[in-house]
Amino acid sequence: MSMNTAVVSSDFSASWFKPQHWWACLRGRMRTAFKPRAIFLYAGQSNSEQGWSGVAQSFTDWCAEHVGENCVVGLSSRWLLNGLVDAELGPQAAVEQVVQQWSHYMDVDAASLQTNWVLRQVLVGERRLVSAAPSALIEALLDAAKVHGVRLVWVGPWWARGVQSWLCDMGQQPDAPEAALTLVAQEPGLVTHIEASLATGRPGRLQRIWVEVANGESPASSGTSVKLVSPQQLGIERRPHHTHIWDHDQLVSALQGEPTAWGVNP
């Protein structure tokens, strides 16, 4: 089972053939060949195209310090649409069903989805998860990456790999009673709730995913809770790219879905 809900790639920029740039890119690729950098793309209060230039500038600043490297990017929930449908539906039928949901709740119709969003879907057990990110955002990241030869190995919800660990852990508890559990994924200003049903000896089955504005209190959860912490909260020296890019070590385990970070058995 894979939670790779959005995968994109970026090639070297036109300047890659310059010897100095080429060697820097090669060193970056080799340095991260087996362990890509993991970063969180922080939305703040912006989720419109007016914010893309700021995001692109932050990412360009980060890329300038990591020339040629491979990286995975966890996206803020503020930028994402997510929908769950039964796995028995085909890809097209799944899109049609989630579009009905998004049209009702988010005012996003099929024409807008095709024009303005990048859509990905993945089977997660008995469910199909459909996610969408603004195409302007993805294009801004790709353009910024090309400038410094950075390769985007994976781009998707920052909580995606953690959810995978959480669901797999459910299937490793054969004596657990049937129940409904909720994983709470917290980022500054937003809380993403992932609800799954637990059946004896089977991986968890996703039921719902929804996002709420944080009210300043820690949300209650019958499952587990993961909270992203900003560089400023950790006392890390503020860098230009920290406006939208967080890349400190404490984030890596959460973004990579490491079991210990998500409160599950390794």
Image (tube, rainbow, N blue to C red):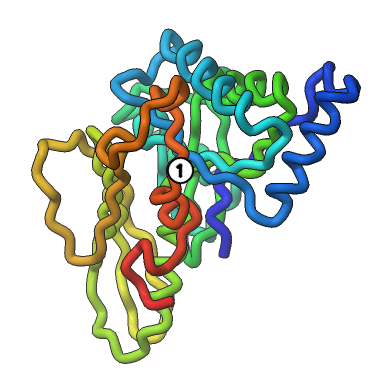
Residue 146 horizontal/vertical position (percent): 72, 23
Q: Is residue 197 above or below residue 93?
A: below
Q: Is residue 102 above or below residue 211?
A: above
Residue 111 visible to the viewer: no
Kindly identify the residue that appears in the image at 37 percent across and 27 percent down.
238
Rendering coords of residue 5 (x, y %): 55, 46
Whether residue 166 is visible: yes
- Write the residue at 55% across / 27% down: 62
Instruction: Decide which of 143, 115 is in the foreground and name it.
Output: 143
Relative to 218, say whether 57 is above or below.
Answer: above
Q: What secondary structure is found at the residue carrying circle 1?
A: strand
Which residue is painted at 40% across and 15% down in the image? 48
Q: Which residue is mark 1?
A: 157
Q: Amino acid at mark 1?
A: Pro
Q: Position of residue 172 (x, y in %)?
A: 42, 83
Please, which residue is most extreme toward the top here? 50
Q: Answer with left or right where residue 34 lies relative to residue 55.
A: right
Residue at point 88%, 20% (across, down): 18
